[in-house]
Image: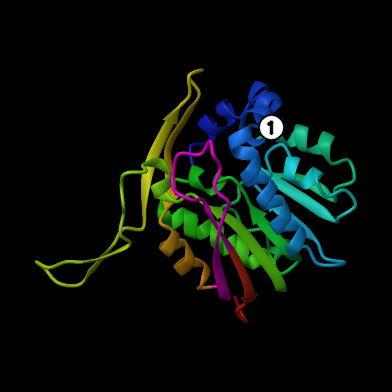
Amino acid sequence: MNIRQVLETYDDDYARTYNQRFILKEWSKKAFDRETEIVRQLLQKEGKWLDVACGTGYLLSRFPGVPRAGVDISPAMLERARQANPDALFFKEGDFRDAVPEWEGQWTLVTCMWYSYGLVESMAEVHDVIKNLALWTSEQGACFVPVSDPHIFSKDTKISYLNTDKYYGGNVLITGVIWTWIEESGKRHENMVAPHVEHMVAMFKEYFNAVEVIAYPLSRRWWGPQRKAIIARAKKHGR
């Protein structure tokens, strides 16, 4: 993760306009509404919710009164999150690749929304993030993560996860792709990692016995393949 670039992108101006640009637009609000309903179903009575890379805290703010907390690397985004969630347990500035031992097994719901894990620099670091999400989830809890499916970025391209090498033998796994978005404003999201859905499932299955892929409703304004997310439950003992 190029932390300097992330902080330069997710600055005060970006935080101020983020919700309107990326959550409340017609094409994205349908997906957000679906995610809100999933969170509502996963929240347990008397449980605690940790939103990793919480951004402006908009999703958290939909659930006043729920014991909830957020972590993000951007001070500007966290300031918005605190304003939107005055009753939250806490908001912490931090890197989701870093271990936080005191969080292990403490959260009945752990979320990481809107492909934020794609800001890391490799699939190995995506795995590090997933390991932390799993560690922080309680044994009876659940983890909810939308998937940055490579097919979202090219509607005409089908990327197979498992490919047989007919020349040298064995199998080739296409674990993900790298993509860059340069906004009209000049803001840059460089070398983002988009893991293959099947590889995301495989990584979550290291830590959970039940890993489900769910599809979002299609939007009239969304041109690409149907969006997906992972819900992982039944954490494996000792993981």
State yes or no: residue 144 in magenta: no
Q: Nearer the viewer, residue 62 or 202?
A: 62
Q: Nearer the viewer, residue 168 or 214?
A: 214
Q: Residues within 10 Å of mark 1 (few under 14, many from 20)?
A: some
Residue lying farthest top? 185
Q: How many marks?
A: 1
Can residue 208 be seen in this snapshot?
A: no
State yes or no: residue 210 in magenta: yes
**Label 1, on which residue?**
19
- The residue that appears at 54% across and 47% down in the rendered structure is 218
Q: Nearer the viewer, residue 125 or 233?
A: 233
Secondary element at tag 1: helix
x, y percentage for residue 14? Answer: 63, 25
Q: What segment is highlighted magenta in the picture? A: 207-230
Q: Is residue 130 left or right of residue 90?
A: left
- The residue that appears at 56% across and 45% down in the rendered structure is 116
Q: Quadrant of residue 58?
A: top right
Q: Reply above or below: 89 against 211.
A: above
x, y percentage for residue 55? Answer: 68, 39
x, y percentage for residue 30? Answer: 64, 43
Q: Quadrant of the C terminus?
A: bottom right
- The residue that appears at 83% across and 50% down in the rendered structure is 63
x, y percentage for residue 126? Answer: 48, 55
